[in-house]
Amino acid sequence: MTSKQELGSQVKRLLSGVSDHGKQHLIEVETDLVQTAFLLGEAIEKLGASFFALHGAVIAQQNEVDLLLTDLDGDDPKMQRLRMIQEEIVQHTNSAVTGLQFQDLTSQLLARTVQRIIGLRNVLSSLAADGVDLPNDGEEDEIVLKLNSINKHLEAQSSELKDLLRKAVHQKDMDSGDIEVF
């Protein structure tokens, strides 16, 4: 095999190897991200339900305390302390629920990352497919032209993927205002 013939063969092997190894790693990353998103969703759902149940129990308790204290004067220091504690509990509960809103943003980012991985995996697949057309016994000029074509194709795919995924994430759940990131 001549040096020119070996060049085409080695470049073809390189493109195929990069594509195969890259796709395999991206499949594993995608699987991990999907599992992370699922676990995050489950955890946040349980936390949200717990916060709302806790808030409901605190309100019920406060209603019972209010009934017990109906005989006290509204200006009584004990009554004022209880009201302050009640307001503090409501603020902490609302802060915790607001914090849960970031799960929605995080889910959007994870979904976008999975889309980016799928797009990158498709780019790598096209790299392998384009590399198949590379001539084993072609002249150096012919190989260089084919490599330039592959590079242009990869740049176009990468640009399309970048344009598709360059979007801000928006809060979709909860009613305490809009949040935009990026």
Image: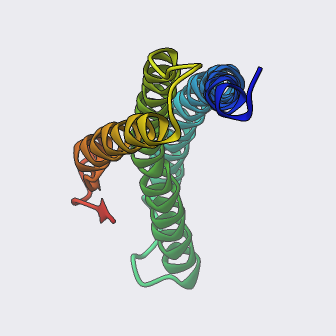
Q: Is residue 167 above or below residue 51?
A: below
Q: Is residue 10 left or right of residue 79?
A: right
Question: Which part of the image, by quadrant, shows the C terminus?
Answer: bottom left
The one nearer the camera, 54 or 164, is 164
The residue under the point 55% across, 69% down is: 82
Residue that lies at the very extreme toward the front in this rendered image: 2
Q: Nearer the viewer, residue 73 or 48?
A: 48
Vertical comparison of 166 with 7: above or below: below
Along the line of sight, the residue nearer the viewer: 168 or 177: 168
Name which quarter of the figure residue 152 lies in.
Answer: top left
Which residue: 41% across, 30% down? 119
Against 75, residue 18 (above or below) is above
Residue at position x 63%, y 20% from top? 27
- Say whether residue 145 is visible: yes
**Residue 179 point in image, percent of width and height:** 28, 61
- Give the left or right position of residue 140, taking residue 14 as reference: left
Give me the residue at 25% from left, 52% from top.
Answer: 167
